[in-house]
Amino acid sequence: MGKRIKKGIIASPGIKIGKAIVFHGDEVKIPKYHIGEEQLLDEISRFEEAVAKTVKEITEIQEKITNESFGDLAEIFSTHLMAVEDPIFTARVRKKIQKEKRNSEWIINDITIKFISTLSKIEDEYLRERIIDISDINKRLIGNLQKNKKMNLSDINENSIIFTSDLTPSETALLNREYTLAFVTDHGGKTSHTAIMARAMDIPAIVGMGDITSCVRSGDLVIVDAIHGEVIINPSKDEIDEYTKYQKDIQEIENELAQLTNLPSKTLDNTEILIYGNIEISDEMNTIKSHGAHGIGLFRSEFLFLDKSLPSEESQFNKYKQVAEFFAPQIVTIRTLDYGGDKIHGVMRAPREMNPFLGCRSIRFSLKNQDLFKTQLRAILRASIIGNIKIMYPMISTLEELLEAKKITYSLMEEFDRAGIGYDKNIEMGIMVEVPSAVIAGDILAEHVDFFSVGTNDLVQYILAVDRANETVADLYNPLNISVLRLLKNISDIASYHSKPISICGEIAGDPKYTMMLIGFGFREFSMNSKNMYQVKKIIRSVTVEECEFFAKSILEMKHTKDIENAIAENTKKRFPEIII
Ligand code: PEP
Ligand code: MG
């Protein structure tokens, strides 16, 4: 039997068997030695070769990212290139080697430390954030000077299961999908954006496994069971056979479910439930469409801001146009920039905050950075004549925020009118319901919106005061807490009373275990990643609204989360034994 570790949070479901590659943080050993007079020229050549190799590597990564349609991310590495090739830096290293007769790693590291210490004293947050770039380049350059070079995530060139302490959303976007079978991290939660990216990219992942990186060694054979949240290290032959069969069974169920693509998404009593896609990167468009989605319910536009420079109006316009055109006449709901929390740092000159999830996040950031907000709105408005676009403002917590966001949008429309620029004059504007105050004041907000979309990932964290990305409190982050369920029912009732469409786009919308309950609460529009669409549709097609309402009512009468969990689990087991997640 292999060593079994069971304590992870399933970020993206699936089963993979393969070789582990462990990334132990980024610590790099710096060799320090003196060089004899006769070796000085060789040492300088060694440094020059490492620079050339580093430049080649960065260029290759850039090309690869561009070819994989992640062109928006490629610019991240331009600044790295500029720094490595900087003639002042290279001349300084050469001179120091000759004068001080020390090895290249030692000298480069000294220069870097000095530079970082100067940068860290600077007030400007943006410049201080460049420290991470400088140390990145330092590591890469020193790695290339050493024979046993440390690997980077993007260097992987054979099928591997990645074990690492943590991944940022942008690191996840940069993973080499061709070779990354799965990934497992020490940290992270189910609704962290890293987990969301993994699902979007269809890479099985388990997060929040504590100290998994110290239990696995590179080269170990591992089974990642991201159905039960387990990792099996060096499995026995029987275990490999068992899991290989399991993989096949899952594939068969998925093939069977795929038959549902073109069948209507209607309950047995003929109520249509619309299934939309959540999109982070334009790559996902094809899969979402091929899964029979009704359009895009949530376009997380912040993933266009991963770059080290801000996307121009033109580049945003092209992206929005591309997606709108692709789905027309279906709806594409573009959420304006949701900056902050665990997402998108570096590009904006925002100060670091003690509580980023409670800070200048999302619409608050856009309203404080109106040039940036207007650039985005202009791009969206211009694209709106091409397809069927809706604008969605994220994290609205007060009426004033909503009115301000709308005012800015209307002022741009007036500018467009004066300049004769075309846009959809009837473009709908709605809000994400992600904070309890938006539910509590839902009736007031309803008068000013065309639609609501409930973002449960944040709503749960704000109702329960539990950081969605923090694995140490992950057991407290539970969408089945009665307070959460009551607010979901409340906002659904408010929307219905005010005849405003309401969708649900948090991760629970794509969890088939919750489908009956959510239909019972009154939701008729669900937005999710493509992975779960078939399973959700299968449930929709097997139930009546009446039985869902009955089930939801029984749930709302419960007090204990455990009872609710059991009721949902039992119902799923009884009605849909084939559901795999
Ligand atoms: C949400 O909060 O539920 C949501 C859909 O937005 P995000 O996950 O991008 O914060
Ligand atoms: Mg959110």
Image (cartoon, rainbow, N blue to C red):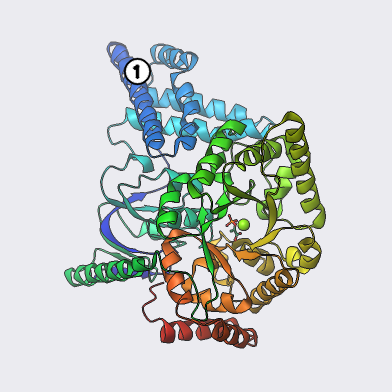
Q: Please tell me in which quadrant of the rendered image residue 223 appears.
A: bottom left
Is disc 1 placed on a helix, strand or loop? helix
Q: Badge 1 local density, few (<14 within 10 Å), some, or many (20+)?
A: some
Give me the residue at 45% from left, 82% from top. Answer: 572
Tell me residue 450's x, y (percent).
71, 58
On the picture, is 352 further left or further right than 181?
A: right
Place of residue 206 in the rendered image (x, y in percent of width and height, measured from the top left): 41, 62
Quarter of the displayed picture in which ligand 1 can be seen: bottom right
Point 42% across, 87% down: residue: 574
494 in relation to 65, above or below: below
Report the front residue among 244 and 233.
244
Q: Is residue 547 visible?
A: yes
- 36 shown above or below 159: above
- Residue that sits furthest to the left in the current view: 237
Please name whichever residue, 410 or 310, is drawn nearer the observer in this view of the structure: 410
The image shows residue 120 at horizontal and vertical percentages of: 62, 32
Q: Position of residue 449 (x, y in %)?
A: 74, 58
Tell me: residue 352, above or below residue 214.
Answer: above
| Residue nearest the viewer, comparing 553 with 436 | 553
The relative height of residue 435 versus residue 270 in the rendered view (above or below) is above
Q: Quadrant of the C terminus?
A: bottom left
Mark 1 CB near ligand 1 (8 Å cut): no
- Which residue is pictured at 48% across the width and 27% down the height? 78
Amino acid tagged 1: Glu
Q: How many marks?
A: 1
Q: Quadrant of the N terminus?
A: bottom left
Q: Disc 1 marks which residue?
A: 48
Front-most of 442 and 157? 442
Answer whether residue 361 is visible to the viewer in this image.
no
